Structure formats: C-alpha cells, structure tokens
Image (cartoon, helix red, strand yellow):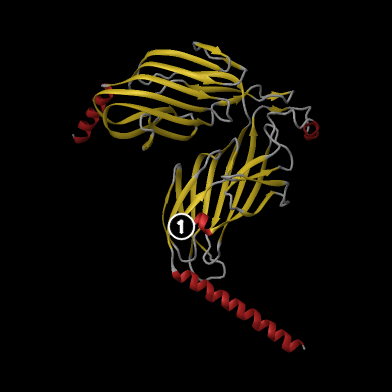
Amino acid sequence: MKNIGILLLFISVVLSTTNEIANVDIDITTAYPGIKMDITVTSEQPLHSYAFYLPKSYEISSLVFLNKETEKELTFTTHNETEYTQFIVEFEDTPKISLTMAYIQINNYLPVPKFISQFDSQEFDYTLLLCPLTQSKTKSCQVLLHHYDKLKVISDTKHSTIKNTTAFGPFDDLPPMELIETTVHSNSLPHIKVNKMIHTVDLPTISSFVKVEDWFEDFTNEGAQLSSGFSRFDFQQNIGNSPNAIGFFEINLNTRASSIQYKDTSGNISTSSLLLNDDNLVLVALPRYPLLTGWKTEFMIGYSLPNEVVISKGKAIITLPSIKTAMAKEVIVRVYLPDSAKYLKVEGKNIENIEVKDCDAFLSFAERKEVLITMKNINIMDKVQLILYYEESINGSISTFIVFGCYVLLFFLGFFLFIKYSA
C-alpha cells in the first residue's frame, strides 16, 4: 500500500507540472553534434526532481544537468526502460525551476553518400531530437541549428534558414512524451572514433615518477569510404586539399610530462613533435599513413609524470590525454597501486565497472593491487579526470628496499666470485 501511495503521489506531481518554454541549441559544426536544451518547469506543488527521456537508440556523451539560474551542476540517476533511457534530476524543493540539459550525440549520423569519388568534403545525415522529452505538456519549443553553408532538411519539419543558422518551430502545445525529431544533411569536421583506449598508470613505491601509457585501438576516421580511384600516394600529392583526411593527431598532455614516446603497432617510433603551451603540452603525432575516411590505425604513447602531479595524500588524480575531435567507445583505466597499498574508492563520471585484482610486484614480495576502471562513450576531446583513493603502507617500501638490496648483494657476490675463480 505504501508503494501505491508513493506512485499516486508521483503521478499527481507529473500531472500538475508544465514545461512553459523550451529553447534548444544544436551545433553540428563540431566533430560531434552538441545539444543544449533549456527548459522552464512550473508546478502546482513543490518539485524536488524531474525526469528527462532519450530514445534508447541514442548514444550520448558528456551529459550534464544544470540549474540555469545558478549554473550549479545537478545530480541525476539513470534508469533503462523499454523504449527510452530515463534521467531523473534532483534539486531543492521549488514550484518553478529553469533546467539545462546538455550532451554530445555520438551516433544517429550516417555518411552520405556511402562511397565518394572526390575527396573534397565529408557529409552526413544527422537524426536529431528537437524538443525535450518529458512526461509533462510543453507550451512552446523553439530550436536553433548551427551548421556550415551546406545544409538540407530531409524530414518534413517546418524551418527557416538564414546563413549558417536554421530555426525549427516554434512547436506549440506538445503533449507529454511527444517525440519531435528531424533529419538533416550537412558537411562536417572529421569524426574520429576510438574503439578502445587503455590508460595505464603505474604508481611507484619508491620512485619519484609515475609511468603512464596509452594504447588506442581501432582509431578510425569515420565517414564516406573510397570505393576506388584514390590512394595514399594521391593524398600525399594533394596533402593540403583533403579536409576530411587526418594527417596528424594533436594529443594534449600535462606540461610536466617527460620521456615521451609515440609508436604504432609495428613497434617503430613514428614522427612526432612537441609544442609547449601555458596550460598543456601538445604532442603532434603523425601516423605512418594519413587516415582517410574509413581507414584506421592503432598506436601507443608513453610518458612519465612527477609524483606531485598525480599523487597527493593518499589519492591519485588520473587525467586522460585529450585528442582533438575524438570520442572513445570504451575506456579502460588500469592503475597499479604502490606495494601493499589498500584500495579505497574511485570518484568520477561515466564509470561502468570497477574491478580490483592482485598482481605481482616488481623486485618485491609485497602484495600489489591492480585497479581496472571501465567507462563507456567518453568524450576525450575535453578533460576527463578520475580520483582514486588508497591507503599506503610502510611495509611495501621496506620490502622493496630489502629485496632490492638482496639482488644487489647477490650481483656483487657473483661478480667477485667470477673475478676470483676466473683469474
């Protein structure tokens, strides 16, 4: 009976809420569409939560909810339903609130045509959600779409275009859960998608540097593919005239990164250069061959960071390198804790799973923990950070010193015995 009462109360609150106005801003001039929805919600009863929905076919990244007036980020929970994904946003009790929902869409686009004969543009069909999907009536919804010069609205949606902006709507008196979508055709920046990124961090027991390694698997330039009549040699002859080909990667690292190496799967260190800016160190890496649309590569970058950049009083601040115009389908963060350290917890967004395993410690009999953190659909164009908490142990350092000392002693003993008996 108690659950039925709570359900009836929730239904009554939903029925008493109204979306007064919704303003939607969509930008498809970037590598992946960015969507921001501003909505003002009023209620006859005080609200402390509100539910937004997206079709389950939508894959998104960098989802955030804000109180528009205070610009404070709001917490939310995710629930999977039959046809939709539900996001319940929580806030303090209020009869009226202005909310912002922002995310990056990483699917629902299709290269058109599938094969191209001239490598001079990259074009896609985008299917986009125009108005917020909620269980309340929406009085009015207005949409602005920012694009390049070339745009064609394929679906039958009322719109008007002025230069590089197309307005959709207004859509008035939308009933609850009314799905308003459109499909547009436009040119775009290259879409880079990483199938899997493995970020390995080795926290030292006695060293003053943290070792970091990143593997990028199936690093792909998506888009219309070449059926025939174009080669890498043709690209090199026309290297400045291919806006949808990728001739280099810009990888942003911490300014104090050192001992940097970049190599591909063949094991050869490839061409790269470093640019030091005020807030980051840019590794400009050239793949062995340029990435035309539909082509992929795999590579690794490795570097060292001073302990004070990563480690601070029992916690490790894990920061992924950022790559321009790239999105990762899966990110695995592998952290090796210092010898005998105890894992406590991890804080961060978009964490799917955490696994803690035992592993062998180098030159030590102490136990060592390996923490595996799995994340899905991660925007590595921006700063992605995790905080890992652990409890250090003095026994780990002592054990390492003792074992290392024994190895040194055995080395010198063997050396002197060799000198003695070989004379």
Q: Secondary structure at mark 1?
A: loop
Residue 62 lies, with reference to residue 182, above or below; the image says: below
- Which quadrant would residue 381 be assigned to in this image? top right
Residue 254 spot, x, y in % from top left: 57, 49
Q: At x 45% / y 44%, what residue is drawn?
A: 352
Is disc 1 surrounded by few (<14), some (14 to 19) or many (20+) residues within 10 Å? few
Residue 326 lies, with reference to residue 180, above or below; the image says: below
Residue that extends furthest to the left in the rendered view of this protein? 1
Where does label 1 land, which residue? 312
Residue 34 spot, x, y in % from top left: 51, 28
- Which quadrant would residue 3 be assigned to in this image? top left
> How many marks on residues?
1
Residue 349 lies, with reference to residue 102, above or below; the image says: below
Residue that extends furthest to the front in the rendered view of this protein? 278
Q: Is residue 413 left or right of residue 179?
A: right
Residue 210 spot, x, y in % from top left: 55, 58
Q: At x 70% / y 46%, what residue is drawn?
A: 273
Q: Is residue 222 left or right of residue 119?
A: left
Q: At x 41% / y 17%, what residue is drawn?
A: 141
- Residue 383 seen from this side: yes
Amino acid type assigned to the residue bearing label 1 in the image:
Ser
> If the image is split into quadrants, where does the C terminus sit?
bottom right
> If the image is split into quadrants, where does the N terminus sit?
top left
- Residue 335 seen from this side: no
Residue 209 spot, x, y in % from top left: 56, 60
Q: At x 64% / y 29%, what residue is drawn?
A: 223
Q: Is residue 278 left or right of residue 143?
A: right
Q: Is residue 330 left or right of residue 67?
A: right
